[in-house]
Amino acid sequence: MLKRTLATAVFGVLVGAGLYAMADDPNLRDKKACKADVEKYCSDSEKGPEVHKCLKEHESELSDDCKDSLEDRKSIVEACKNDKESFCADEKGPREVNKCLREHKSELSDTCKDAVETAKADE
């Protein structure tokens, strides 16, 4: 189930700390998988980049689900990096990049598409 949510949410994550996913809430998968970890280790952190920085600082202590979620994100970010640069370089924030990548979904590289499909298959 975690992998399916990632595949649905894959493209918004595609911005630096982002390059996320195709979902109404690009952070949905990480929020679910890492909710307890965020509450335990990062409750004083502000949303977005601060939370991700905090989770990275506590990486060795995180739950397996949260670690998997963050690792999947890294894989997809790397696989889709060139697509983001090719199609959405002028976009400023995660929402804009998310929208841009969805608009170019059929044009994305095989590497990016394969990363998304692998995430779906690992559900």
Image (cartoon, grey):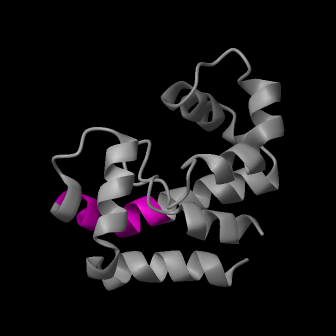
Q: Is residue 101 visible?
A: yes
| Residue occupying the point 59% across, 58% down | 71
Q: Position of residue 83 (x, y in %)?
A: 26, 67
With respect to residue 86, does 120 lie above or below?
A: below
Magenta stretch: includes residue 77: yes
Give the side of residue 77 with respect to residue 34, left or right: left
Q: Is residue 16 visible?
A: no
Q: Position of residue 49 (x, y in %)?
A: 49, 30
Where on the picture, by quarter, is residue 121? bottom right
- Which quadrant holds the C terminus? bottom right
Give whichever of 38, 11 is nearer the camera.
11
| Residue occupying the point 56% across, 51% down | 24
Q: Which residues are magenta?
A: 76-85
| Residue occupying the point 58% across, 67% down | 8
Q: Position of residue 106 (x, y in %)?
A: 31, 81
Give the side of residue 36 with respect to residue 20, left or right: right
